[in-house]
Amino acid sequence: MASMSGIPLQVDVPHYTPANVTREALDFADLAIIDLQKYGTDDGRTELAAKVFEAMSTVGFFYVINHGYSQAQADRMFDIGDVSFTQVDAEEKKRYAGRMKETGSHQGYKLRNYWHIDAGVHDQVEAYNLNRDVSMKEHPTALRPYLPEIEAFGKHYHFKVLYPILRLLAIGLELPEDTFIDIHGYKSVSETFIRFMKYYPRSKEEEDKTNNVWLKGHTDFGSVTLLFSQPVSALQILSPDGKWRWVKHIDNALVINTGDAMEFLSGGIYKPTIHRVVQPPSDQRVYTRLSLFYFALPDDNVKLIPLSHSPVLQRRGFSRRCEDNVAPTMEQWRKGRTAAYGTSELVQKDNGIEEETINGLRVKHYR
């Protein structure tokens, strides 16, 4: 449904009321802030590319502000996301449940208790995942009136946010600006997707058994993850000094990180930072935690090998996860990671590290 101007008409939606920001003194990570208002000039892009390169080659996370959505528009997307959980009953959720293990695709619901966390405890997380092309499959009845807005959201963040970030990442490697854009086609065969995700409070017994960890430390498997900052503190990153630090909420900001695919392509220069989700601080523990993501993946047929012609890779040296002739495609990597996550048997290592093998390569999880 669209207006004469092409802008989706808005259908009434119940309002999701977020929690207040925590008042606890947490050890927050010091992350760079990328202001996309500066992207429109050559000098601005040069400045931003340097900041992005520094962030991605060290910490692996940064914020983006002035990304084109107002606070009111962002709030409405959270309202729509909440419809996935509060306006769809359990039976309908089961009908639209994803088959991650069988298909290697996230599309559909990830129901609660699907992922094993630790000591026999399973997750209390629901997620609804939609391909950026929302017409690829049918969706729950309550969500259908909002599909034009969801599609417009995905299109905006693909072209107006992801593409500028990909250009900045290419500039940082002294590659042609469209290097990464050329392998992230909006209409290409890819699993780039939108995710609504809701964390529910857990019992004290579950918290004790898992040492308050809700999702183990992991890397994302795609190229770039765009996460809307939201006020319930729970996301932590493993800092270069080996300490877990909290990611601070900034109103109407995006939290950006790179994943495995960008590590493969950049020869290890862009770091897929390990991050986890833990129990929120005491003044936020009664609240649900609603999250909104845009997960970008290269096209399925992209071979995940270093862009060794980059002058930066040639000067600095680079690493390979494997030999080029046996490197996975994006399709192979995302199917393997998706099917295994939270369900595979992990091998215990030292210092709280667990491992699994995907496409012959080791993937680490951090307790």
Image (cartoon, grey):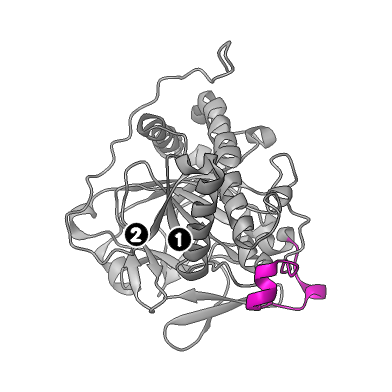
Image location (x, y in percent) of residue 55: 47, 63
Q: Are marks 2 and 1 in contact (CB under 8 Å)?
A: yes
Q: Is residue 364 left or right of residue 11?
A: right
**Badge 1, how many Cα within 10 Å: few under 14, some, many 20+?**
many
Q: Which mark is residue 61?
A: 1
Q: Which residue is mark 2?
A: 247
**Image quadrant where residue 205 sits:** bottom left
- Quarter of the rendering occupied by the N terminus: top right
Check if residue 167 falls in the magenta segment.
no
Q: Is residue 331 left or right of residue 76?
A: right
Q: Nearer the viewer, residue 333 or 250?
A: 250
- Does the rendering let one see residue 108? no
Check if residue 316 falls in the magenta segment.
yes
The segment highlighted magenta reads 306-329
- Quarter of the rendering occupied by the C terminus: bottom left
Image location (x, y in percent) of residue 233: 30, 56
Amino acid carrying label 2: it is Val
Secondary structure character of the magenta stretch overall: loop
| Looking at the image, residue 52 lies above or below residue 212 | above
Amino acid carrying label 1: it is Phe
Q: For the point 42% across and 73% down, which residue is it?
A: 118
Q: Earlier in the sequence, mark 2 or mark 1?
A: 1
| Looking at the image, residue 58 lies above or below residue 94 | below
Image location (x, y in percent) of residue 231: 29, 48
**Image quadrant where residue 96 sits:** top right
* Comparing labels 2 and 1, the label whose residue is closer to the camera: 1
Say how many tags the image has: 2
